[in-house]
Amino acid sequence: MASTLDLTPRASARGVGSNADTITPVYGYTAAGAAFQRATRPDYFGWLEHVRAAAGCTRPIRLSGSLHTVDPTTGRILASRHTDAMPDAAIYTACGNRRATVCPACAQTYQRDAFQLLRAGLVGGKGIPESVAQHPAVFATFTAPSFGTVHTRNVKRHTCRNRRRCNCRAEPCHARRATDPAAGLCPHGRPSVCWARHETGDTVLGRPLCLDCYDHAHQVVWNLFSGELWHRTKQAAQRYLTKLAQQRGIPRVEIPTASGKTRTVAPVRLSPGKVAELQARAAVHFHAIARLDGVHPDDPDAIVPPPAGFTTDDLVDAFRHAAAQIHFRTPPHPDNPHGWVIAWGDTSKGLDIRPISTTGAGEVTDGIVAGYLAKYATKSTEATGHTSTRLTADTIGDYADPDGDHTARLIDACWHIGRPTDTPAPLSERPRERRPRPGFGQRWECPDCGTHTRYAACPVCVAQRQAVLDTEPAKPATANPYARLRRWAHMLGYGGHFLTKARRYSVTFQLLRDTRVAFRRHEHQDHEHPTAGGPPADPPAEDTTLIVGTLTFAGVGWHTSGDALLANSAAAMARERRTTGREELAHELGTTPAGVVPVAA
């Protein structure tokens, strides 16, 4: 079969097979015929080498334009090349999407980067000192409150070794005694009990027992403001630790500022990170990693251990205190003039905080935590059964339905609550404004730019200020905070990033990407090794030229389904070889394969 041919053993792209773009094939063949036609062309190997950077991507981005080789010292253009002279007259680059349903190859790269980023903040590496492994750290889970009764799978005692493939006997979903008042019917005439023992993967899990009793509006508003709730919880936990240091007599630390002055800060610092996950009921809950650091008086950016006496128990107490204390009410809305209450769920049941062990001997280790959180890097709303791009007025009718299923009602609540709430006054009722007639005044000279003009404002300075404003990012509207619900209706109200962290917790995704790019540029370079007893070889000469590209967007996807078949098949086989090599090496060393995301027990 054409899809299993090893057409490029050197391929280093990641990913699996995917669909091509919707462009009509120019050869008139099927996918296998188009692939055969491409493979028999004289420039096939040149094309294959040209698309290596995006071979595993489902819908790569095509760029067209010119590439100039510039001498960085003189600025002289040494050579120029246009994409018209390249295969397919374009440059292919991976899309970089993190969602596995959109692009499995780019999502796998993103997941591995997330694993390295999270683990580096617990054990060090990638520029983070290894001493962080001795800092107190906890793994906490914050859940949303109840918005109505939903079908659940409750296992009181697990006997399985892998919770992901749990086959333990579950308890009845919502059992009630016959004498219990809640054992009858709900106000809408539906049963309030469920005696079923749901299995893992049951489609009814997370669905309300009664759709009319469920508060869909409150849930989407909670999703919208959950980021602010997490922000306030972090602040409350930091204040608790600061107060605890003051009670123990630990003095505040004086650090210099950029202006030459000094300011005092708390001697203990919280470095958290969190990952957002959508449950089956479509409510957001957060998995958080929190590390306790100290403050260096001479280098505020340094990562140092906390003061003596601070332990993991202090971190647990700080988060429990913050979760129970923090709650607020949203701004008024025409549907709810008093706003909605935003708070965490029952802290006695829904708040799970466990210490993290970096020695590999505890119940929750750094590898388990990093792997457990990194697996959410490629997920979005798939757990709810909903997958779509951003919704508009033309497409909202395909997904929203006030009388539909659970997901359709949530999307409808987002669109309804996020509607414009300010009604402009009629034109006849607006006050008339008397504006002065335009005219010229006395000639004057602008003190800023020296322009002579008769206008009331200098036209040169006004144009410059407007140009600066045009380049600044647009700020979100503050008049109606619920307007963001329509923008994030496809995410069921949640508009935050799946992973956020403190600046000092770990490295950034950008650093990991830059390191990978630098490695790929020299992965096929011949390295000279010193001979036995001889002098060391000279280091390879560095590239002293600069490549400047003037590229524009040319399209998305492969030109034909045959191109997608060839590129993705080769990338899939290259990925399989790497996975097999990691597993064999891990088997010899008796460790977990590198790049394999562990599963929490």
Image (cartoon, helix red, strand yellow):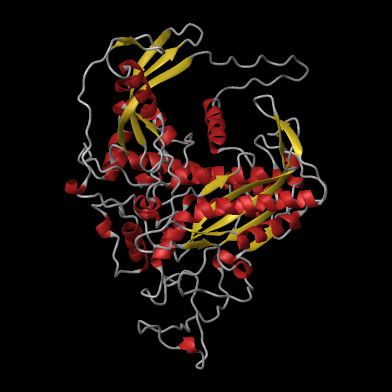
| As drawn, 251 above or below 320 | above
Position above or below: 547 against 562: above
Q: Quadrant of the C terminus?
A: bottom right
- Count of numbered marks: 0
Q: Nearer the viewer, residue 6 or 353?
A: 353
**Which residue does the image show at 63% across and 67% down from the upper left?**
161
- Name the residue nearer the viewer: 536 or 362: 362
Q: Position of residue 396 (x, y in %)?
A: 27, 56
What is the quadrant of residue 34 in the picture? top left
Extreme bottom residue here? 179
- Residue that appears at 25% across and 59% down: 397
Q: Is residue 366 visible?
A: no
Query: Residue at point 33% right, 47% down?
Result: 19
Q: Position of residue 459 (x, y in %)?
A: 30, 17
- Quarter location, residue 418: bottom left
Left or right of 118 on screen, residue 148: left
Front position in the image: 458 or 295: 458
Q: x, y percentage for residue 273?
A: 60, 48
Q: Based on the displayed image, in which of its 4 quarters is residue 352 positioned?
A: bottom right
The residue at the point 43 percent across, 56 percent down is 331
430 w.r.t. 82: above or below: below
Q: Nearer the viewer, residue 41 or 504?
A: 504
Is any part of residue 458 visible from this angle? yes
Q: Does residue 356 appear to the left or right of 329 in the view shown? A: right
